[in-house]
Image: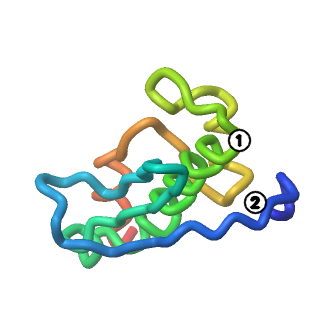
């Protein structure tokens, strides 16, 4: 964020096992503060995907919160560009299960 947006924005990254289902991550903005949660239950099987895609995806949401540019479903063109600038691979709206599965194959 600092390199591309000139911001030093510290957002807690919390690993939790309290997610229901297979949600990989979630950025939450409440009372003027942002927190990012990662699903501990899927981390072991999808660790590379979380590192390569999910963290940047959620930090891009945090950035949009910070800039006051959160609207619609949160996955605007500006969000997509921020996700890529923050190092995300793919920067899709939701998890691409094919990417997760293919990433586990040895070839």
Of helix, strand and loop, which one carries label 2?
loop
- Report the Cα–Cα distance between label 1 and label 2: 12 Å
Residue matched to label 2: 1
Residue found 62% across the figure and 37% down from its top: 80
Mark 1 neighbour class, 10 Å CA radius: few under 14, some 14 to 19, many 20 or more: few
Of helix, strand and loop, which one carries label 1?
helix
- Does 1 sit left or right of 98 as displayed? right
Instruction: Report x, y in % for residue 91.
Output: 54, 44
Is residue 3 shown above or below 95? below
Instruction: Report x, y in % for residue 69.
Output: 65, 32
Residue matched to label 1: 67
Residue found 57% across the figure and 56% down from its top: 59
Instruction: Report x, y in % for residue 53.
Output: 50, 57
Front residue of 103/65: it is 65
Front residue of 11/85: it is 11
- Does 3 sit left or right of 61 as displayed? right
Front residue of 14/91: it is 14
Is residue 61 shown above or below 87? above
In this view, the residue farthest toward the front is 31
Instruction: Report x, y in % for residue 84.
Output: 67, 49
Front residue of 35/5: it is 35
């Amino acid at each position: 964020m600092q390199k591309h947006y000139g911001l030093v924005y510290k957002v807690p990254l919390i690993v939790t096992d309290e997610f229901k289902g297979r949600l990989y991550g979630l950025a939450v903005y409440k009372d003027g503060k942002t927190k990012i949660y990662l699903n501990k239950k899927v981390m072991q099987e999808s660790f590379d995907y979380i590192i390569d895609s999910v963290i940047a995806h959620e930090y891009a949401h945090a950035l949009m919160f910070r800039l006051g540019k959160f609207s619609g479903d949160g996955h605007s063109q500006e969000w997509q560009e921020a996700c890529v600038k923050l190092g995300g691979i793919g920067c899709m709206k939701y998890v691409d299960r094919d990417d997760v599965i293919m990433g586990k194959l040895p070839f």
